[in-house]
Amino acid sequence: MKMKIERVELHQIELPLVHPFETSFGRESTRTCILVAVHAGGLTGWGECTAEVGPWYSYETVETAWHVLGDFLIPFVLGQEITSPADVVARFRRVRGHPMARAGLESGVWDLLAQAQGVSLAELLGGQKACPEHGQRDRVKVGVSVGIEPTLNELLDQVAQYVDEGYGRVKLKIKPGWDVDVVRAVRERWPDLPVQVDANSAYTLDDAPVLRELDQFNLLLIEQPLHHDDIVDHAKLQAQLRTPLCLDESIHSPEHARWALDIAACRVINIKVGRVGGLTAARQIHDLCAERGVPVWCGGMLETNVGRAANVAMATLPNFSLPGDISASARYYPEGKDIAAPNFVLNDDSTLSVPAAPGLGVRVVPERLAAARLRHLARE
Ligand code: NPQ
Ligand code: MG
């Protein structure tokens, strides 16, 4: 099916978080992002660009993504006939870097094409084909990412709340001075809870002795302890640890995933649609890891329901064998604020249900979008 891209809109929005989120690189109490609307043939596909206001998690910002989308990526697709996401990926190949900007528009095209074909995004991504013996997953395993708190007691209260809500896997954010004691306290109170940690690049190889101490706590994995672009030091560290290392920030593309696996820099990969430049690249990394027997899981960027729906669809692919950072909508935004509906709700088995409706399976609510919007651009 051919679709001519007639119009593309950018919406910069800001939403309040239900609880401030602190990592080794800072504390946030609101989330700003860009939503991309792709119009063709009477349909609108939606994509989320996960760049933040500041260059903390990655070098991209809302401002750089706005610029790259508006001045380069949108003109590459406007007026063009598209038959598959591969057409968009091919047109974006000239652009170096800026994966979150590319992913915002590319994932909107995936939603558009899924709607045009009358299939869910999960189905278009090929979960079913990739996993003939199990068929399409209708639920995906999820966990919750718990930020750094002012005190250990507040952290334990947060974890207790999430465990009570039914989360079956918890990720603790760590940094130097907020690591071994915190993990020990959580382990003592919840001896059998699946727990993993994420340092967001707060350590160096000199900290290997501290990171080795984490081996005693039976963690699922240790995520991105070292430099945000490194794989060499991670390979040296992995050789000294029993716990699997998982790379997040360092994996920018399928090539980076192959390089990391070739030198044994990690035993697990966190896949984020934005960080790797779109759903096409995300699926390629998934397939590569499946071939190599390396488990993957879906990372989170405090998405709205638009980005969350794309994450849920992606996590139906068979090698997403660890729970994702895809929590229920209520973990992120106050009731009635998220710009898309319906909300994702946690099931009893620590899963989210995969929408069966065409495309993402969530609808953008115009009044909520208008209420959250800071800036708007339309190109045709
Ligand atoms: C991670 N996310 O896995 C990230 C990074 C992260 C859910 O742990 C504002 C916007 C603040 C995006 C903080 C989780 C953020 C952000 C952290 C992403 O490393
Ligand atoms: Mg991470």
Image: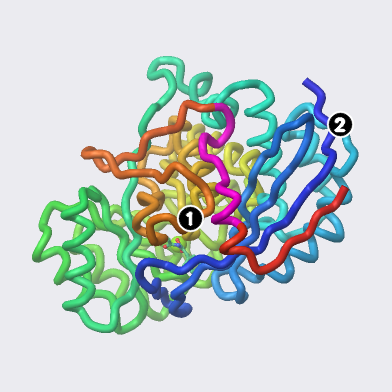
Q: Nearer the viewer, mark 2 or mark 1?
A: 1
Q: Secondary structure at mark 2?
A: strand
Point out the tag, 2 or 1, that comes first from the N-terminus. 2
Residue sitting farthest toward the top: 133
Q: Which residues are magenta?
A: 358-369
Mark on residue 176? none
On whether residue 143 falls in the magenta region, the answer is no
Q: Residue at x 40, y 70 (%)?
A: 199
Horizontal side of 187 relative to 367 (left or right) equals left
Q: Residue at x 88, y 36 (%)?
A: 80
**Mark 2: amino acid:** Glu
Horizontal side of 211 relative to 42 (left or right) equals left
Per the image, the residue denoted by label 2 is 81
Residue 21: x and y in percent read 40, 71
In the displayed structure, 86 sits above or below 220; it is above
Residue 285: x and y in percent read 57, 42
Q: Secondary structure at mark 1?
A: loop
**Mark 1: amino acid:** Asp
Q: Residue at x 32, y 51 (%)?
A: 143
Mark 1, Cα crowd under 10 Å, few <14 / some 14-19 / many 20+, is many
Marks 2/1: CA–CA distance: 32 Å
Residue 118: x and y in percent read 61, 21
Per the image, the residue denoted by label 1 is 338
Q: Quadrant of residue 322?
A: top left
